[in-house]
């Protein structure tokens, strides 16, 4: 009895989905713990540090949007 090759690919696909979800989740809390250090080292105001945080979050969101809408 031969196995169906599609079932093997489907069985492995959940690993890719879970790994992508974990990678996306790690991106969310990258900058907030570092904001006090960035403010001190770069002499940033709270508004500038918040803008930096927003830029990082926006870049992650746009990268995700690009990967979902325009797959390579």
Image (tube, rainbow, N blue to C red):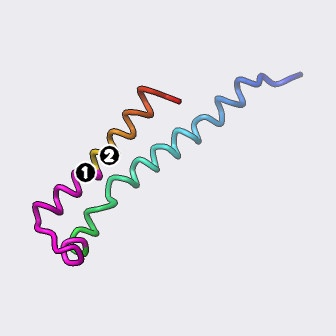
Question: Residue at 51% across / 43% down in the picture?
Answer: 18
Pick the front one: 28 or 63? 63
Dot 2 crowding, Cα within 10 Å, few <14, some 14–19, many 20+ = few
39 magenta-colored: yes
Residue identified by numbered label 2 = 59
Determine whether 48 is above or below 55 in the image: below
Q: Report x, y in % for residue 19.
A: 53, 46
Residue 19 shown left or right of residue 52 in the figure = right
Question: Residue at 64% across / 29% down in the picture?
Answer: 10
Whole-number angstrom distance, CA of label 2 to CA of label 1: 6 Å
Residue 12 shown left or right of residue 55 in the figure = right
Q: Report x, y in % for residue 34.
A: 28, 69
Question: Residue at 22% across / 51% down in the picture?
Answer: 54
Q: Report x, y in % for residue 25.
A: 39, 50
* Residue sitting farthest toward the right: 1
Residue identified by numbered label 1 = 55
Determine whether 6 is above or below 63 in the image: above
Quadrant for the N terminus, please.
top right
Q: Helix or strand or loop: what does disc 2 sit on? A: helix
Rendering quarter of residue 13: top right
Main secondary structure along the magenta-highlighted residues: helix
What is the magenta range? Answer: 38-56
* Residue sitting farthest toward the front: 42
Pick the front one: 6 or 48? 48
Question: Residue at 77% across / 22% down in the picture?
Answer: 4
Determine whether 49 is above or below 39 in the image: above
Q: Helix or strand or loop: what does disc 1 sit on? A: helix
Q: Report x, y in % for residue 70.
A: 45, 27
Please report contact status of discs 2 and 1: CB closer than 8 Å, yes or no.
Answer: yes
Dot 1 crowding, Cα within 10 Å, few <14, some 14–19, many 20+ = few
């Amino acid at each position: 009895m031969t196995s169906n090759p599609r079932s093997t690919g489907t069985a492995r696909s959940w690993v890719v989905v879970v790994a992508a979800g974990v990678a996306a989740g790690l991106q969310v809390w990258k900058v907030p713990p570092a904001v006090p250090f960035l403010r001190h080292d770069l002499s940033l105001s709270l508004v500038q540090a918040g803008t930096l945080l927003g830029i990082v979050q926006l870049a992650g969101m746009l990268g995700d949007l690009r990967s979902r809408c325009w797959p390579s």
